[in-house]
Image (spheres, rainbow, N blue to C red):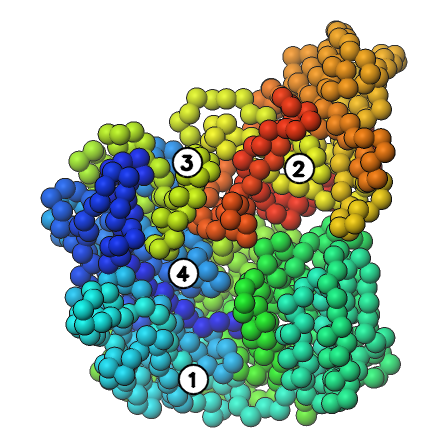
Amino acid sequence: MSGLQGVGLLLLWGSACLWLPGSAWGALVISGEHEALQETRGGARSLQVEVYSVKVDCTVTSRFAQTVMTSRARNKANVSQKIFFKVELPKTAFITNFSMEIEGQVYVGEVKEKEKAKKQYKKAVFSGQTAGLIKASGRKMEKFSVSVNIAAESNVTFILTYEELLQRKLGQYEILTRVKPKQRVQEFQIVTNIFEPQGISHVHTHATFLTNELLSLLERIVTDNKAHISFSPTMEQQRKCPDCDGTLLDGDYVIKYDVNRAKSLGDIQVVNGYFVHFFAPPDLPRVPKNVVFVSGRKIIQTREALLAILNDLHEEDHFALILFDDKIISWRESLTKATKENVKEGMDYVRRIRESGATNINDAVLRGVNMLAKDRQEKKLPERSIDMIILMTDGMPNVGVSSLPRIQENVRSAIGGNMSLFCLGFGDDVDYSFLDVLSKQNKGVARRIFEGSDAVVQLQGFYEEVANPLLSEVDLRYPDNTVDSLTTNHYSQLFNGSEIVVAGEWVDNDLDNFILQVFGQGFEGDFQVQGQAVIVDWDVIYPDDKYIFGDFTERLWAYLTIQQLLEKSKSDAPDEKANTTAKALDMSLRYSFVTPLTSMVVTKPETEDGPDSPLIIDKLVNPLNSMVVTKPETEDGPERPFITDNMAGRWIKEKQLSEKMSTDYQHISKADSLLPHVIPTHFVDGDPHFMIELPDRDDALCFNINDKPGTILNLVRDPKQGILVNGQTIGDKKIPPDGKMNTYFWRFGIVHQTLGVRLEVSTRDISVFQDGKRVKLLWSDTASVKGPNVDLLLTKDRSVTVTLKDSVKFVILLHKVWAKHPYHQDYLGFYTLDSHLLSPSVHGLLGQFYHGIAYELSDLRPGEVPEKPDATMYVKGQELNVTRGWQRDFRRDVKNGENVPCWFIHSNGTGLIDGDVTDYIVSGLFKTV
């Protein structure tokens, strides 16, 4: 971790919801939202679930926050009902406990290794019963949702606990509660208690829904080192208007605070054998920065933000501007001092930026590195200053070096630890994990900038966090014989408004030996402070609250250690990664944290139909993942699954959208299907569009590969059977008016080493090589060739079917284009039949999918094009934004094709395919490397 600490605690509160059995669609009813969501195909249903109590209790002890959410609901119907508990929590938080109380019986979750819980989860999903994951539902949040079957006229209590270290950002900590109960609640209460022995400098509370009447209900009691804030409106006070039943409570409830900082040494807390050291010294002068902005030319929304950022530069700073597409353009050849005149000229240059296409990240970043290094060597920059590069991109590299590992290695080697690289990824087409590793390898951080009207605000907010460096190369040192198991104690930078936190075990009870030292490089010279730790007696400061604190320092240390181990594993070498992951797993289990390595298993009560499947609570690897709930069968047959998202008011609209698209979404949440097994077809055709048909799920996935003409890609490689298929692309005759160069496959090489067969199929002819002999066929022929190891069926100017003995069958289609077409050329399509006959070790751009692909879909939402909605896909431990669309299958109609609905994976299939596209590039049509 760097001195940049990130965001504060965010806490979102959802509402209970109910799925009523009934017709094929059923009804999704959100408590309190009668009008839009009550009607079903089978008629209207009345609301039968009452959420009568909602409580949020947050206790902050020296920045370590424990939040307990409690919701009580009553099934008022005379039949059993499924009730859902939904809540949102910060992505950086770890769930530590979840329990349900039903009719006096308490069901408590148990944290287990994720792999051990995986089989239970798959079994639950396969059988059509409820299974759960935590999912992401926004920029900073994860959604938690579970369901349970409740008997008629019975009550249920849900209790969720999670913990997180609050992170200081822009000079304060933040606790945010999104209040959306959806109905008036008999007992509604949010209580926050803050205990800070350093002393509380300020506390601010506000809410978007607070009217003058509700403002008087806000109770704030703030002393030197304790704050109590509570909000508890009655049902009548929650009423939106005198004559309506709706609730006023709909918006954000925010608490911001900071602590006193009188010591340059920082603050240290020791409790029960563990310590935590907070370091954010006051009144340090800022260190001048030398910043190179490296921006893709097609990120047009960065222009406004760059103008604001340039205007905020300090005169002692230096800056440079580098733009990239397929070319690299520098505003000036070296960095420029941020005088008013230079800043004005830089802003004028930014205003003239025109949008352009390609992405050459490697050369652009290296240009920035070389510029900083050269100016530093020539002593053009202040000796006491900090060098940084801010990379802004919205796409994947497609010009110059496009291999992501190679770019990372080139940049790391060039920087050599001498400067920081901050990466900003715009939109969904960028590989955020690539930027994350790239920045962490170079003393920086990455941030995703979400598309939207506030993209400029997001960019400016990030810049404000790094705009004012105070110290660099900060070392916090403790006596070796006094402490053990330290978290990270070296930070590349400390920025104004942030805070460094170090924790560890205290193994010596003699305070005289607990000497702290902090070293760093500041503006005025080397920073160095030393002193003896002063231990706060919590029992004296908080005599009436001492029962609250317990082992918070130990849990804070464990939380911080696990977070840092998980971050470290992302950039570790393979041999180190296994050890790092094992340590993080061991600590996650020991302290009952639901992390990306663990799951919480909740054994649910029996129902009238027998024992229900266990509930599996997962924190997914990537912070944008989904929870899927699959419904059991009813008397009317299997119900459609639904997506546990905050879709309330959108559900009917999207339900109609999915009906309009026929049955395309029936498969959304099924990990496996009970449909009869059908042999799938996998193909690549067009520009080039890859299609993976999944008949067992009545679905398909698709992606494009965009690369330079002439590239040879491996499509299929089965080392056990000796089968290899490569394809070479061809481009348009010239660049069309729209500026986009289309590429297609124009020839394929097929090898069966075991049988001694080799085929080359191009848009011109077909050649078969075996036993030193060659058979050549022209597309103008109609022929059937049968050999001992291979059969060919050639249909004139249309297709050739290749059947390898006792093995797979390939069909290659010829697409003939008018010879005088100004841009396009003839091209081929490649289709695989009987792919199940290949071995489990088969791979390649197509081959890796021959034996299926496990994924989940959730969060169906409108896309940019009305008929092409977006969804969230969880696949291979990652979350992807995918779009519903169509690709054409030309087997029956080689001229027009047939539309096949599919989920489109953006950015060259990143996240779906193993590795990177460059991993599949080979040097020859019959080569494996």
Q: Amino acid at mark 2?
A: His
Name the kind of residue labelled 4 in the image.
Answer: Phe
Q: Which mark is residue 689?
A: 2
Tell me if mark 2 has few (under 14), some (14-19) or many (20+) residues whose alpha carbon lies within 10 angstroms of its own. Answer: some
Q: Position of residue 742 (x, y in %)?
A: 76, 42
Residue 331 against residue 81 in the figure, above or below = below
Q: Nearer the viewer, residue 841 or 335?
A: 335
Tag 3: amino acid: Gln
- The image quadrant that residue 543 belongs to is bottom left
Q: Which residue is mark 3?
A: 666
First along the sequence among labels 2 and 3: 3
Q: Quadrant of the C terminus?
A: top right
Q: Earlier in the sequence, mark 3 or mark 1?
A: 1
Residue corresponding to mark 1:
258
Q: Residues within 10 Å of mark 1 (few under 14, many from 20)?
A: some
Kindly check if marks 2 and 4 are in contact, taking CB atoms under 8 A apart as contact: no
**Which label lies toward us, 2 or 4?**
2
For the residues bearing labels 2 and 3, Cβ distance under 8 angstroms: no
Observer able to see residue 415 = no
